[in-house]
Image (cartoon, rainbow, N blue to C red):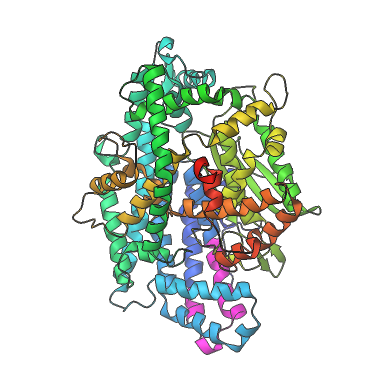
Amino acid sequence: MSMKMDTNNPLLDFSGLPRFSDIKTEHVEPAIDTLLAAAKKQLEMTASTAPDLATWEETLLPLDIACEQLSRAWGVVGHLHSVADTEELRAAYNACLPKTTEFWTMVGQDERLYAIYKAIEQSDAAKQFTPARLKVLANSIRGFKLGGAELPADKKPRYAEIQDRQAAITAKFSENVLDATNAFELIVTDKADLAGIPEYAVQAAEELAKSEGKEGYKFTLQFPSYFPVLQYAEKRELRETLYEAYAKRASEFGPAELDNSALIRELLQLRQEEAQMLGYKNFGELSLVPKMANTPAEVVNFLRELAVKAKPFALRDLEEIKAFAKAELGMDDLQSWDMSYASEKLKEQKYAFSDLEVRQYFQEDRVLDGLFKLTEKLFGVQIVKAQADTWHPDVRFFEVQKEGKAIAHFYLDPYARASKRSGAWMDDARGRKRTEQGVQTPVAYLTCNYTKPAAGKAAQLSHDDVQTLFHEFGHGIHHMLTRVDELDVAGINGVEWDAVELPSQFMENFAWEWSVVESLTAHETTGEPMRKALFDKMVAAKNFQSGLQTLRQIEFSLFDMLVHTEFDPGEANILELLAQVRKEVAVLVPPAYNRFPNSFSHIFAGGYAAGYYSYKWAEVLSADAFAMFEENGVVSPETGKKFLEEILSVGGSRPAAESFKAFRGREPSIDALLRHTGMVDNRQAA
C-alpha cells in the first residue's frame, strides 16, 4: 500500500538521509499525522487478514514498512528535541507524543494482529524462516503479551491511558531537569575567586558571560561548566554553591513547576498498576521479562554480592581521602562538595599528574583518527569523512566502508551547548534491513558533550571524554556492523537491555591500552605523543577510588530495583528508601538536601527503569570478553573477527547469553571485572 505523501515536507522524504536544514517546526505535526494515518490504515488492512491466510511478505511486511517510516520520522523529531531544543520544537514534540504513544499501544494490543503473528509462527512457511526471522516472531509475540494484547476488552482503555500518561511524564521529567539545569547561573566578578580552576574553563565562563553582555565569568550547571569548579576551585564556598544548586535541581527547593517529586510518585504508581494488570507482582518483574537476568531477586543478590566485595576497598578509599584532606588541606569535615577537589589533589600527589596535564595530549582529531584506525585493525572496516546535511555546524558525518563499499554511516555531535541535553548517547537514525532494492544500510547518531574549543584552537579531551567517546562508538559499531537483514533484530534491536552495554563498555578498555593510547596522543604545543611514564601513572591511578565508584553505581542500581519492586509509591517516602539503600551499601552519604532522584533521568525519563543494574551486569560481560583480547595480544585481528562474528554482527538475532558463550567458550565470570577495577586484594591474591 502506498499513500500520497507531501514531498515538500522533509520529514516525509525517506529517499535518503534526513534533510535537517529543511526541517522546520511547522513540518512536525503534519508529517507525524500523515504517517500515523498511513500506519493506522495499514494496520487495519493487515489485521483484517484471516490468520490462516496471513504470510510474512504479504501481511506483515507492508505494516513493517508503514511503522518504520513513522519511527524514522519520529526518531528525527526526538533527536532534534534532544540536541537542538527550542520552545516551538518542544511544543510540537509534546503535541505529537500522545498520538504516537497511543498508536504503538494500539498495535501492541491488537488481538487480530497477535493472532496473525501466532498463526505465522505455527505455519509450514515458518519452517523455512531464518533464525533471525523466527526471533522477530518470538519477540513480537512476547511484545503482544507485554503490550496488553491478552487483557480483557474492558481493561484495554485504562492500559492505553497508562502508556500515554507515562510517556507524558517521562518527557516532562526530562524537560524539568533541562530547564532547572539551565535556570541556574552564577556570575563571578572577582577573578581571584576562581583560583585553581583551569584556564580553559575560566575562558569558557568569560566567553559565556560576554556572549550575554555580562561582566565577569558565568558558571552554569551544564557539566563542562559545573564540574571543573567542583574538581579544581580552591574557594570552598564556590564549590558548595554549585554543588548545592546541582543537588537540588528539579526539586521542591526550586520553582514548583519544575519540581519532579510528584511526577516520580505518579510514574511509580502507573508502572506498578501496569505490571499488575499484566499479571506481574511489580514493575521489576515486568521489566526483566525481555532481559538476561531472570528475577529481581537475582539482580538484587548480584548487586549485594558485588557490594560486599567492593565495600572493604571503598572504606579504604574513604579513610585515605579523609586522612589526606585533614593532613594536607586542613579539612576536618570532608563534605560532598569537597570530594572531587580533595580526590583530584590526592591523585596529583599520589601519581604526580593531573587531568589537566593529560588533557593537553588528547586533541580531538587525533583521538578520532586513532579510534578509526583501531576499528579498522580489529574489525576490517574503514571510516572516512563524508558529506551530509546536519542540524548544527559542529556536527560531522562519516562513512563506514568494507572493501571500498559503504556499509553504514554516522553523525558525530561532539560539544555541549544550551539547547542540548547533557550526557552522551548513541541513537539509530536508520536500521539495517533487506528490501527489494537491496540492503538498507544502518545510520547512527553519536552524541557527546565535551567542551567546545576556543576559537582557532583544537578541542582537547579529558581521558574521561576519550572513554565516553569509545563507549558511544562501541554502541555505534554494534548498530552499524550488523549482518542481520531483519530490522527488528539487526544491530542493537532486540538485544537484551542488560547485554546492550557489552560492546560499549568493551570498547572503553582500549582507552587503557598503551599501544592504542600512544596513537591517540599528540601534545598541543610540541606534537609529541604522550610519554609512557605519564601513561603508567594514569594506569596506576585508573582504579583510584574504584571501591567508592563501584558502591555509588550499586547504590543507584539497588535503589532503582527496590523502588520498582518493594516500594509502595502511594504510602512510602522515596527519600527514606534511598536512605536505607545508602545505609546498606554506601560509605559516603550526601547532605540531607540532596535530591538525587529528582534528576535521575536514566530511570524516570530513559529506558533504564528497573534496569540500571545492567551497567554493572554488562560490565561483567565486557571485562570478561576483553580478557580474551588480553590473552591474545590486545589489538588482535583474529579475536576482533570472532567478536565481530559472534557478538556485533548477530545483533539481537539470538539470545545474548548464547552469543557470549559462542565468543568466550564458557559462561561469564566476575573475576575479570574485579581484576580490571583493582578490587582483588593483593594479600588474598598472594
Q: How many marks?
A: 0
Q: Quadrant of the C terminus?
A: top right
Q: Nearer the viewer, residue 75 or 496?
A: 496
Residue 363, quarter of picture: top right
Residue 246 lies left or right of residue 460; in this view the side is left
Q: Residue drawn at (37%, 46%), measured in percent from left and top?
A: 555
Taking 49 as reference, is 166 above or below it?
Answer: above
Residue 212 lies left or right of residue 383; in this view the side is left
Q: Quadrant of the N terminus?
A: bottom right
**Residue at far left of view:** 571
Residue 124 lies left or right of residue 110; in this view the side is right
Residue 165, quarter of picture: bottom left
Residue 564 lies left or right of residue 100; in this view the side is left
Q: Residue drawn at (29%, 62%), measured in percent from left and top?
A: 272
Residue 610: tell me if it is visible: no
What is the chief secondary structure element of the magenta stretch?
Answer: helix
Residue 141 point in image, percent of width and height: 48, 76
Q: Nearer the viewer, residue 172 or 273?
A: 273
Residue 262 point in image, percent of width and height: 25, 48
Residue 430 point in image, percent of width and height: 60, 57
**Residue at far right of view:** 403
Q: Residue drawn at (48%, 44%), measured in percent from left and top?
A: 82
Residue 275 point in image, percent of width and height: 32, 67
**What's the magenta region?**
42-70
Residue 46, magenta (yes or no): yes
Residue 158: tell me if it is visible: yes
Residue 62, magenta (yes or no): yes
Q: Nearer the viewer, residue 287 or 103?
A: 287
